[in-house]
Amino acid sequence: MGLRAARQVDLVRLLGSDAAAMTRTIKRLEHAGFVRRRPRPTDRRATIIEPTEASLALRHQVDEIWAELEECTAGEMPENRQAEVVRVLEQIEASLTRAATRHAQQETGGPAAPPEGLADHV
């Protein structure tokens, strides 16, 4: 996800969270100075969450650390092999998503949607 303003409801969907957990997370991030909330200009009922300069600076640091981690773990691996590893990990994720959905169906006695954020991989 690029760092840009987003509606809180969109963040819930994107991250596979629930509204209450997202509200708590946003409050913590806001208190830490990483995001700010504002009403959406075209719909005052909706809340827009936007990154602050502090979060943009942190994002740059995280990107650098992530690139270093990728180089350490897969830097010597040919690109086709890296792609193969990603495909295998996606298959594992899809299998786990299906298992979680089956488990939820058994627990509730009815159909359950795949966990949000993972449904598009099934």
Image (tube, rainbow, N blue to C red):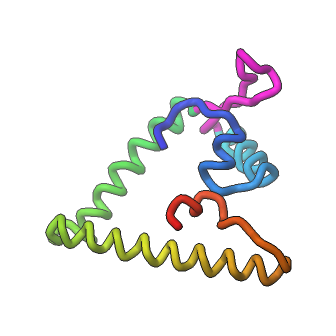
Residue in front for this viewpoint, 3 or 88: 88
Residue furthest top in the image: 41
Residue in front for this viewpoint, 95 or 62: 95
Q: Quadrant of residue 102?
A: bottom right
Q: What residue appears at the point 39 percent right and 42 percent down from the top-left corner? A: 60
Residue in front for this viewpoint, 114 or 57: 114
Question: Is-magenta flag for residue 54?
Answer: no
Main secondary structure along the magenta-highlighted residues: strand
Residue furthest right in the image: 109
Position above or below: 61 against 47: below
Q: Position of residue 21 (x, y in %)?
A: 76, 54
Q: Position of residue 122 (x, y in %)?
A: 53, 67
Q: What residue appears at the point 66 percent right and 77 percent down from the top-left corner? A: 100
Q: Position of residue 113 (x, y in %)?
A: 70, 65
Q: What residue appears at the point 29 percent right and 63 percent down from the top-left corner? A: 70
Relative side of 117 to 18, left or right: left
Q: Quadrant of residue 115?
A: bottom right
Q: Position of residue 81 (x, y in %)?
A: 20, 72
Relative side of 122 to 90, left or right: right
Question: Is-magenta flag for residue 45?
Answer: yes
Relative side of 2 to 37, left or right: left
Q: What residue appears at the point 36 percent right and 76 percent down from the top-left corner? A: 88
Position above or below: 22 against 87: above
The span picked out in magenta is 33-50
